[in-house]
Amino acid sequence: MTTEGVLTPEFDRQIAVSPAGPGRWSADLADGWTVGGGVNGGYLLSVLGNAVRAALPGKPDPIAVSAHYLSAAVPGPAGIGVDVRREGSSLATVAVELSQGGTTRITALATYGDLGRLPDDVATTAGPPAIPAPQECVPNTLAPAEIRANAKLMDRFEMRFHPDQVGWAVGRPSGLGVLSAWFRLAEGREPDPISLLTVVDALPPVTFDLGLMGWAPTIELTVHVRARPEPGWLVVRHETRNVAGGMFEEDAEVWDSAGRLVAQSRQLARVPRPA
Amino acid sequence: MTTEGVLTPEFDRQIAVSPAGPGRWSADLADGWTVGGGVNGGYLLSVLGNAVRAALPGKPDPIAVSAHYLSAAVPGPAGIGVDVRREGSSLATVAVELSQGGTTRITALATYGDLGRLPDDVATTAGPPAIPAPQECVPNTLAPAEIRANAKLMDRFEMRFHPDQVGWAVGRPSGLGVLSAWFRLAEGREPDPISLLTVVDALPPVTFDLGLMGWAPTIELTVHVRARPEPGWLVVRHETRNVAGGMFEEDAEVWDSAGRLVAQSRQLARVPRPA
């Protein structure tokens, strides 16, 4: 596909939605975003978020999206239903569900607006994560072939890990519960508010850094998008502080190339079972 | 009201719900929980959460509750509709709305389960907030009468602020964006998972500590309840790191008397306008 001679990056094709009746959209979940047994939850949120954007003219940007994950999605057709719960002058809130074959995969609430119309005050006390330059970090392309075979999503982006936080890859996790990495989508797809919904859930589970290897099913994930990201590399930092009762929280921060904190997320996930 | 001679604490009367048809409950929002122009959002979440508990036999405890606040509630009658989206063996997820006179106040998603049935592993790396003993902290009863008149909710609980974090009360906010306090409900009402939904939103907005006085309307609030709290004082800590675009995030932690991190929440709220 081309637009004025420019190739459409694969990400835009993979998150595309088509109208399918009043308040309904259809999508085709990409095989390329699978990891372990299912489709990556962040990518699913971008697909769902793209349908919400289509449903809310004049309010293109996710501000707060809360998703509860009900069952594992598989590649192939999916339907998305959007039900507007309130439409105000600056913000609108919708209930939205992504389903496959009559089974709900994700039920979510999403508050959208226009990030370009927010006041430009910034009084952030947080600082960007300390991470060496991308060329001094560890690329995900170095992952063993058997890991890559089970995580097709790793071909969808470039990820470069903080060299002090990859001990888990060689059986020496730090035990701190922190992972950080540079991130950019394949084919030069620049970040935008919709792609940030993917970015907050693209790194391996932070529990890798605690030596708990394996897929960590998300129960609930909420994302706040705080600004439109500038083009270029993003820095993503994951942290967990409370592993208990078979669950853990994973906080993510996403910083753009201008050094701005553009997204914050928290998810509650199940601790991976020993393989 | 008495049960075996023991008075029912006011909190239980204030969050009470009555069946009002299939999937419907009615409540009477207490005048005593008002602050500024509206009813406190945490208290509303306990009312709503109590209806979800009634709707899900065998799954009494909120695990993850995500609420989007659509309009300010007022004291008086309210209706709550609960729609089960998935019921599994250990967790169930519902969509739930609290309305008054046909206007939705809160739309939420709630995943419930039984905290008593979770595995008892705890590998929390976080530590409880450093705070002097309750008798060395600053009680909310010292607040000026004009503040108390505008915040009736302050009579619903005891709150004792960290003495280093009350500079905002005398025009000298620390600027750090941190508030912590001891908390317990009035009339000896011990904490439980439903009351924790109130506790995470009972302190003044953390923006007080940045010198931004005034009510901070919540856009979205998600709570994770991680364990049943032990009886006694709770410690609550609020923090914000990203004030930008007219909004801020407020993270809350609640620790119980046994030193366990029992709830974590994050909300996105609007920065208060100068009075």
Image: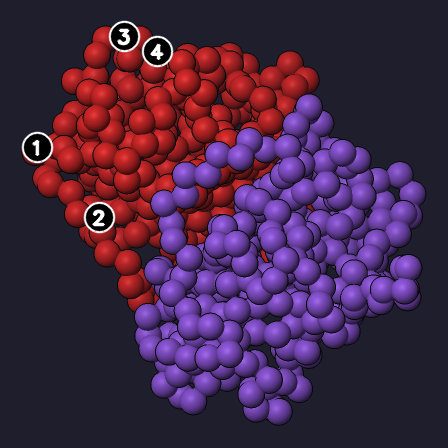
Chain colours: A purple, B red
Q: Is residue A7 left or right of residue A114?
A: right
Q: Check the residue under mark 1 and report the chain it is in.
A: B
| Labelled disc at residue B129 | 2
> Which residue is pictured at 68% across the width and 24% down the height?
A88
Q: Can residue B204 be seen in this view?
A: no
Q: Check the residue under mark 2 and report the chain it is in.
A: B
| Nearest the eye: B155 or A174 | A174
**Residue identifier under label 4:** B150
How far across and how far down the image is residue B269, in percent? 48, 33
**Residue identifier under label 1:** B135
Disc 2: CA contacts within 10 A as few (<14), some (14-19) or many (>=20) = some
Quote the CA–CA distance across marks 2 and 4.
29 Å
Mark found first going from the N terminus, 1 or 3: 1
| Nearest the eye: B84 or B173 | B173
Discs 2, 1: same chain: yes
Q: In this view, does A4 lie to the left or right of B24?
A: right
Mark found first going from the N terminus, 2 or 4: 2
How far across and how far down the image is residue A72, in percent? 67, 65
